[in-house]
Amino acid sequence: MKVPSKRLLQVLRSTEFGSTARHSGLNPPIRQYGSSRHPLPVRHRQRASIATQLPRYFSTVACRQAIAANKSKTDRGPVSKEDTQTDFGTMNVLGNTAVPATSIDACLSDGFHLDNGLKISGGSGCLLVAGEAFIWRPWEAGIRSKGTGRGKMINRKGQWDVENEAWGVLDVMWPKPDLLILGLGPSMHPISPETRDYLTSLGVRIDVQDTRNASAQFNLLSTERGVGNVAAAMIPIGWKEPRS
């Protein structure tokens, strides 16, 4: 009689263990997810579908090409010609409003370009009041007694401080604008109490910004409210405070 081989013994043992486990019920059969009898849970199915639709790319160029190809597959057809579509152009309330002639087209390092074709250069600022444009050089207005020298506008406390003579146009005109937008050059500084009190005494409210943002705000508010209610005093963005 021949001795059984190791392979035959392994097969017999596995067959006997499987039949015993089926009859005893100790080890329930393992579910094979993904088949028709035991489908995957919903969250796993969603992840599997996303993983198959969006493969991984280690190159940004290949990823962009795959996204463009995927967009072409989701084409929704021709554009609808119905009249019920929203025309966002008609929702612009300022679309038919004329732009003021003194609106600022460009801020240069040594001046400004206005919408009416006027070009201010030579390092001068501009004072825009009631639809008129004036060359404005407030650093030449004089010497304030509390520390600001001629040719300077920043005092020892870091405040923007100019003489009252710099606002001569606002002092003599009537009616005065409701809002004055100050563009203080490349950066913004706090206004000194003396300058703020003088402008407040004229009945003018102040909005202080750097010149770029002040120009954009003046263009918007002067179009919306009118040049009679909004004025602007701008310093070139290339202005540099002289050293003491």
Image (spheres, rainbow, N blue to C red):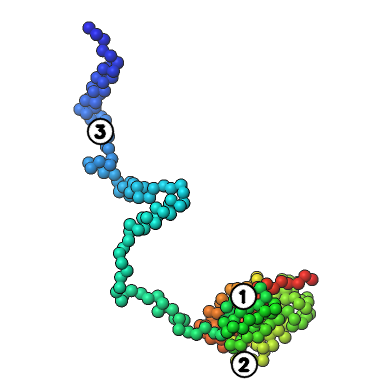
Q: Is residue 169 above or below residue 181?
A: below
Q: Amino acid at mark 3?
A: Pro
| In contact (CB < 8 Å): disc 2 and disc 3 | no
The residue identified by callout 1 is: 107
Image quadrant where residue 195 sits: bottom right
Mark nearest the camera among 2 and 3 is 2
Query: What quarter of the picture does the C terminus occupy?
Result: bottom right
Q: Which mark is residue 29?
A: 3
Asked whether, in this view, residue 222 is left or right of residue 53, the answer is right
Mark nearest the camera among 1 and 2 is 1
Q: Is residue 41 above or below residue 211?
A: above
Asked whether, in this view, residue 139 is left or right of residue 12, the answer is right
Disc 1 versus disc 2: distance between alpha carbons? 28 Å
Q: Amino acid at mark 2?
A: Trp
- Residue 146 location (% of width, % of height): 77, 77
Point out the residue furthest to the top here: 1
At a point 52% along the width and 83% down the height, the residue shown is 99
Disc 3 versus disc 1: distance between alpha carbons? 79 Å
At a point 67% along the width and 88% down the height, the residue shown is 169
Which badge, 3 or 1, is on the more N-terminal residue? 3
At a point 43% along the width and 51% down the height, the residue shown is 62
The residue identified by callout 2 is: 174
Q: Which mark is residue 196?
A: none
Which badge, 1 or 2, is on the more N-terminal residue? 1
Image quadrant where residue 166 sits: bottom right
Image quadrant where residue 215 sits: bottom right
Q: Amino acid at mark 1?
A: Cys
Choose between 73 and 128: the one closer to the eye: 73
